[in-house]
Image: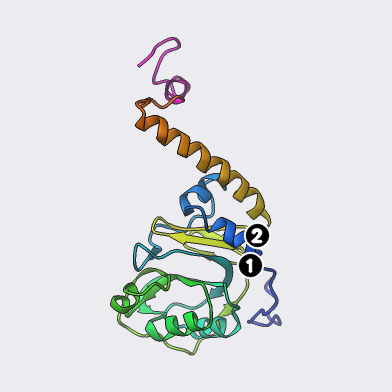
Amino acid sequence: MTNLTQPMINREITRVSAEDVRLAAEYQAAILADVAGRRGTLHGRIKPLSPNMKVAGPAVTVEVRPGDNLAIHAALAVAQPGDVIVVDGKGDLSCALLGEIMATQAEASGIAGIIIDGAVRDADTLAKQDYPVFAAGLNPCGPTKLIPGRVNYPVSVAGAQVQAGDLVVGDVDGVVVIPRGDVNAVIALAKKKLEGETRRIAAIRAGDTRAPWLENALRSAGMLDEGESL
């Protein structure tokens, strides 16, 4: 049963380290997602307002009722520089939860970026700026500021579980969340994967265009008989 006496704004969280954020930011979200077991990616509806937007940092999680952004304002007030605001907006697109004013406040406060499973507005202005805002869609309708929400509690955002302090990385491909305790291992695996992919791309460009694993995979899937080749 939920403890209704808990404070709705949790100010004390343990964050992934700044050094780990810096190291993880060197990799594409796709690389990190692959080595994390293809888990932790947000639904593809969550997109940056501009393809050049990138973000990495510890999550400050927010849960709101659809169409109300009171808890997001609270998160902006308690977040620390380098944090990423991650909002469970329930995928609702009936009203924007954020626009230019709040994004400007976040940037001025040193917050690394904003990710919302919901709608935003003022997209023309925001898309022309560098500050990273990821959202599920757009709507010109503004939100209310009346309904209690929660800050820095576990949330489910666009199909991914997010704990406050987890690592969040987003780019043009989308967003991946890495549990804080897994970050060091994932970064090490990402380094190896990137090295392997770099070698494979170089081999393809040199003429080795057949994937070395393909025929074994086809045999395992029953698409080629044993001893048969393409």
Classify 61 as above or below 188: below
The image shows residue 154 at horizontal and vertical percentages of 61, 67
Q: Position of residue 188 (x, y in %)?
A: 62, 46
**Could you tell me the amino acid type at mark 1?**
Gly
Magenta-highlighted residues: 213-230
Residue 182 is one of the magenta-drawn residues: no
Q: Nearer the viewer, residue 219 or 204?
A: 204
- Identified by mark 2, the residue type is Arg
Residue 181, picture quadrant: bottom right
Give SS at disc 2. helix
Q: Position of residue 144 (x, y in %)?
A: 43, 88
CA distance separating discs 2 and 1: 7 Å
Query: How many circles with numbers are drawn on the protein?
Result: 2
**Residue occupying image coordinates x 60% and y 78%:** 80
Which labelled disc corresponds to residue 175? none
User: How many residues crowd mark 2 within 10 Å: few (<14), some (14–19), many (20+)?
Assistant: many
200 in relation to 145, above or below:
above
Query: Which percent across, then down, holds residue 5?
Result: 71, 82
Q: Mark on residue 165?
A: 1
* Coloration of the structure image: rainbow
Q: Check if mark 2's residue and mark 1's residue have beta carbons within 8 Å.
A: yes
Q: Residue furthest top?
A: 227
Where is the C terminus found, in terms of image quarters? top left
Helix, strand or loop at label 1? It is: loop
Q: Is residue 223 magenta?
A: yes
The secondary structure that most of the magenta stretch takes on is loop
Q: Is residue 5 above or below residue 206?
A: below
Sequence-wise first label, 2 or 1: 1
Residue to which mark 2 is pinned: 180
Where residue 183 sits, quadrant-wise, is bottom right
